[in-house]
């Protein structure tokens, strides 16, 4: 499959309003949201091909040369932590496909921000967890989310286009046997696919001392096949669960994407992430770093902020398509301090330019060109 230098979204809008970007203080946007969570996509490659995320064939992979090195990721992460990012979540694609994954965890886990050590989490499909989990825990991984949408082998094969349910189950078993808590399992709820398994998935999670979190399907598949009718809504999910458990809303959600409920009074819980029918943009504290060095301030953003000219000044932009940054971009030797200053400024600009909401429900909504595997979920 062809490797392409990706120019999937607008790299960066005009720089005219950069004057207003705060030069110090917390990472705050113009709507008062302080950003504390950085999602780091380690690769766009994956061992599965979930229908809601990737096409079966013909995916345009990021060029290998454009994938951030561990040194580059660590550099961006250190700068981000120094200005208030306190949680890193490693994702992808499938983060466990990255051969240096244990080193990535080890290097990022040592980072400290002004308020102490960062928290390091990962979202994975679970395949290869039995191989890597002990090393990652030893290296400092704090939390794990594992995705599983169905417990039925035939469905799993159809939904992920791979026959790997047993590998995912082995990964979940390994996580359950470890000390990593809280453990979360993610499931995208889909009409006519797994909507009859919602209760079974929660029970499965409870058996593994984990919290199931249902996600409303979002228009983020690389094949652009999303439809509102196919999505199972928050309301429908709660109605189904209420046939089996009494649900008590848990207060104190903060900026977290999941609304959580006690099951039969607790302590067991379930979560629902209703990005489409009950958006939580007003409290969003997240930004994203793609595997090819683009900062994104929203999953649904069509604008990206290119760090490559800062990270790889002598090679132009790294991908050959980035626009100038105004901070040590393009040519010449950027000193370490200058490079860090450029990264900080780009982080601040990215956050500053964040829109109030994702507008999925607006008729003019435009799905981003990248699929979820290339954005980082
Ligand atoms: N490969 C890993 C995994 O599946 O957990 C990490 C990357 S994946 C993109 C991160 C999360 O995004 C998964 O829980 C997945 O179910 C979710 N996801 C992917 N595409 C989605 C979509 N279109 N709508 C809602 N969630 C989606
Ligand atoms: Fe891979 Fe995760 Fe996307 Fe499924 S959701 S195709 S496991 S990146």
Image (cartoon, rainbow, N blue to C red):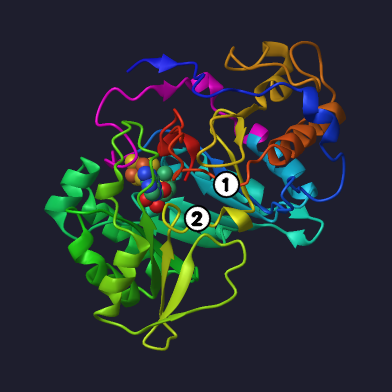
Above or below residue 148? Residue 90 is above
Check if residue 215 falls in the magenta segment: no
Q: Is mark 2 within 8 Å of ligand 1?
A: no
Label 1 CB sits under 8 Å from any ligand 1 atom = no
Q: Which of pointers 1 and 2 lies earlier in the amino acid sequence?
A: 2
Residue 362 at what x, y percent from top left?
A: 46, 41
Residue, disc 2? 279
Which region of the structure is painted magenta? 47-72
Residue 125 appears anywhere in the view: no
| Residue 101 pos. (x, y %) | 51, 44
Asked which secondary structure carries label 2, the reply is loop
Q: Residue at x 69, y 43 (%)?
A: 77
Q: Nearer the viewer, residue 237 or 291?
A: 237
Q: Which residue is mark 1?
A: 357
Report the image quarter containing ligand 2. Answer: top left
Q: Which residue lies at the image location 70% right of the left edge and 19% below the top edge? A: 309
Tag 1–tag 2 contact (CB < 8 Å): yes
Is 66 inside the magenta-drawn segment? yes
Q: Taking 93 as reference, is 322 above or below it? A: above
Classify 10 Å Cα crowding around label 2: few (below 14), some (14-19), many (20 and above). some
**Image spot of residue 244 (x, y percent):** 25, 81
Quadrant showing the N terminus? top left
Outermost front residue:
363
Instruction: Give the quarter of the image for residue 18.
Output: top right
Query: Which picture quadrant has residue 51?
Result: top left
Residue plotted at (73% across, 23% down) = 310
């Amino acid at each position: 499959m062809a490797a392409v230098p990706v120019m999937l979204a607008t790299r960066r809008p005009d720089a005219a309003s950069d004057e207003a970007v705060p030069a110090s203080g917390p990472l705050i946007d113009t709507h008062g949201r302080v950003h504390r969570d950085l999602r780091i996509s380690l690769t766009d490659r994956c061992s599965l091909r979930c229908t809601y995320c990737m096409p079966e064939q013909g995916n345009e992979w990021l060029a290998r040369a454009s994938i951030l090195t561990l040194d580059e990721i660590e550099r961006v992460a250190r700068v981000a932590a120094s200005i208030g990012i306190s949680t890193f979540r490693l994702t992808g694609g499938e983060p466990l496909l990255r051969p240096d994954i244990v080193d990535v965890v080890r290097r990022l886990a040592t980072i400290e921000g002004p308020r102490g050590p960062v928290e390091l989490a990962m979202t994975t499909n679970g395949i290869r967890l039995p191989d890597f989990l002990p090393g990652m825990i030893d290296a400092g991984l704090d939390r794990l989310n594992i995705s599983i949408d169905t417990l039925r082998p035939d469905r799993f094969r159809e939904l992920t286009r791979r026959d790997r349910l047993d590998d995912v189950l082995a990964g979940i078993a390994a996580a359950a046997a470890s000390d990593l808590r809280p453990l979360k399992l993610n499931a995208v709820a889909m009409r006519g696919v797994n909507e009859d398994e919602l209760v079974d998935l929660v029970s499965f999670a409870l058996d593994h001392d984990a919290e199931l979190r249902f996600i409303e399907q979002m228009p983020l598949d690389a094949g652009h096949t999303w439809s509102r009718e196919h999505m199972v809504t928050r309301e429908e999910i709660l109605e189904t669960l209420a046939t089996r458990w009494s649900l008590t809303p848990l207060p104190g959600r903060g900026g977290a994407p999941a609304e959580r409920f006690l099951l039969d009074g607790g302590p067991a819980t379930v979560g629902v992430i209703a990005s489409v029918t009950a958006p939580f943009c007003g409290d969003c504290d997240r930004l994203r770093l793609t595997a090819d060095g683009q900062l994104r301030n929203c999953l649904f953003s069509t604008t990206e902020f290119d760090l490559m000219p800062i990270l790889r000044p002598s090679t132009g932009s790294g991908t050959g398509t980035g626009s100038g940054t105004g901070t040590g971009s393009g040519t010449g030797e950027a000193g370490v301090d200058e490079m860090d200053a450029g990264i900080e400024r780009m982080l601040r600009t990215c956050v500053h330019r964040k829109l109030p909401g994702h507008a999925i429900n607006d008729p003019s909504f435009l799905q981003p060109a990248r699929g979820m595997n290339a954005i980082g979920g």
